[in-house]
Image (cartoon, rainbow, N blue to C red):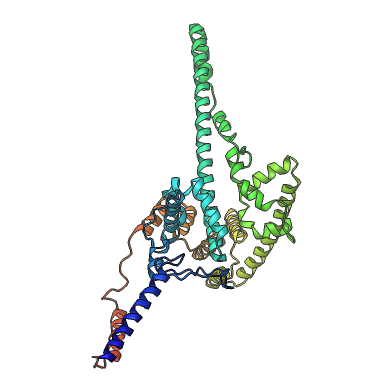
Amino acid sequence: KSRAAVHVMTHVLFEMMFLKTVYLLLSLEGISSFVVTPSIANTRYHERSTSLFGLLDEINSDDYNLMDTSNDSSGGINDDFEVLLGELVFSTNDPRVDIMNNFDRATSDEFISWMDKKAENSSDPNERLALKDLNEMVVDIKRKVELSKMAEERAAREAEKEQEKMCLEAEKEAEAGRKMSNADILRKAAKISEVDVGEATDGAAEKKSFFEEELTPEIRMSYEDSLKKLLPPYKAGETPASVVAANYEKFDAQFVKVLTERSANGDEDAASLLGALGEEQSKRIEAATETLKGMLALGEPMKMEGAIVRLAREGKIDEPFLLLLEANESQARDAGAMGPAELMKKLRFRAAEEKDKLVSSKEIRLIRKLLRAEDSIEREKLLEDAFTPKESLLVSSLPWHRFFLSLVGASVMLFSGGRYR
């Protein structure tokens, strides 16, 4: 019994010491749920004491808050911009089509600024380049739409002024007619009847050509970006000749008119760029002449067409080459040599078609074919062929259909281990 009593007393003392220890731990400073912060002041570990966090503290933190209740007003806008960017990037359409379909959203100053910042903050160089290209496309479309609106407004103002001028002239003529006598009216009618038809043709011939037409403010504004990129200051190692060679396709007829106007007004940079353009055109025409001579030396039309296919793959069918073919066709036709003229025409069409095959966009290929069509009947046929759904390629009546099915059956036999008949 004494041993049992001692055992019971020992157990009671142990429980009392355990409860006292727990009470002291709970009374320490800095205790919280699953967090223990030692409050020993006179130890060397006091300055770098750490906190122990439990699972409950981790769950209660903001890291697991799936319902963001913050008052950040830019969060919703950024989310909308992310959605719009995803629509533009992952759409199967041409980005320009999607930009026009979402014109107000995509061309807003907020979205353009957000795209610019996103591109600058991107750590991936490919993503940064893609975002910048897309942003430049958005800015370019926005500028073109604005210039188009400006041109329409200017045309409307000019038409209104012309209408007012015509009304004033009609009123003056009506006022003068009311003051005329019957004899004056007869004399004026006789003068009108004596007008020669040739005068009307002379008046029609007074129409200005493309290069004689004045440049509108909208045309000048549309080439501002091109002027900034192609005119000095240049980077190290760049010259007007190298800039023209690298950007030759950008020098269209309107841009040449803009440069010519600036050169006439004393712009030396524009004059040097025009000089470099002339030298580059001469080089390209010389190269195209040598290419054409080599092709015509083959003698046979079939070999010439084969050479055109090879030249297209090598990238040697350019604008000067096509212009030389057209010039030779015109000269042969004017000289009465219809055979060589038809051959030049056939080669020119084949060269243009082979060049179009290198273009990835079907729409651009169709537009080029429509522009080359000689009459409305041919254009109608091209449009009909382009928009007619193509039938299935597999037709059971064709002989190779059975051969294709035999190949499929043989493959099934190999994988299934069965017998093919």
Residue at 35% from the left image edge and 77% from the top image edge: 16
| Residue 327, percent from left and from top | 61, 56
User: Left of 10 or right of it: where is 287?
Assistant: right
Quarter of the picture holding the N terminus? bottom left
| Residue 193, percent from left and from top | 50, 20
User: Left of 182 or right of it: where is 410?
Assistant: left
Q: Which residue lies furthest to the front in this view?
A: 2
| Residue 89, percent from left and from top | 45, 60
| Residue 94, percent from left and from top | 45, 57
Does residue 371 appear anywhere in the picture? yes
Task: Examine the rendered structure and indicate whether residue 8 appears above or below residue 278.
Answer: below
In the image, 10 versus 123, the foreground residue is: 10
In the image, 384 versus 13, the foreground residue is: 13
Task: Examine the rendered structure and indicate whether residue 244 appears above or below residue 150.
Answer: below
Residue 418 lies in quadrant: bottom left
Does residue 216 appear anywhere in the picture? no
In the image, 32 versus 290, the foreground residue is: 32
Task: Examine the rendered structure and indicate whether residue 85 appears above or below residue 314.
Answer: above
Residue at 45% from the left image edge and 50% from the top image edge: 72
Task: Examine the rendered structure and indicate whether residue 374 appears above or below residue 312.
Answer: above
In the image, 301 versus 213, the foreground residue is: 213
Quarter of the picture holding the C terminus? bottom left
Q: How many numbered marks are there?
A: 0
Residue at 73% from the left image edge and 39% from the top image edge: 265
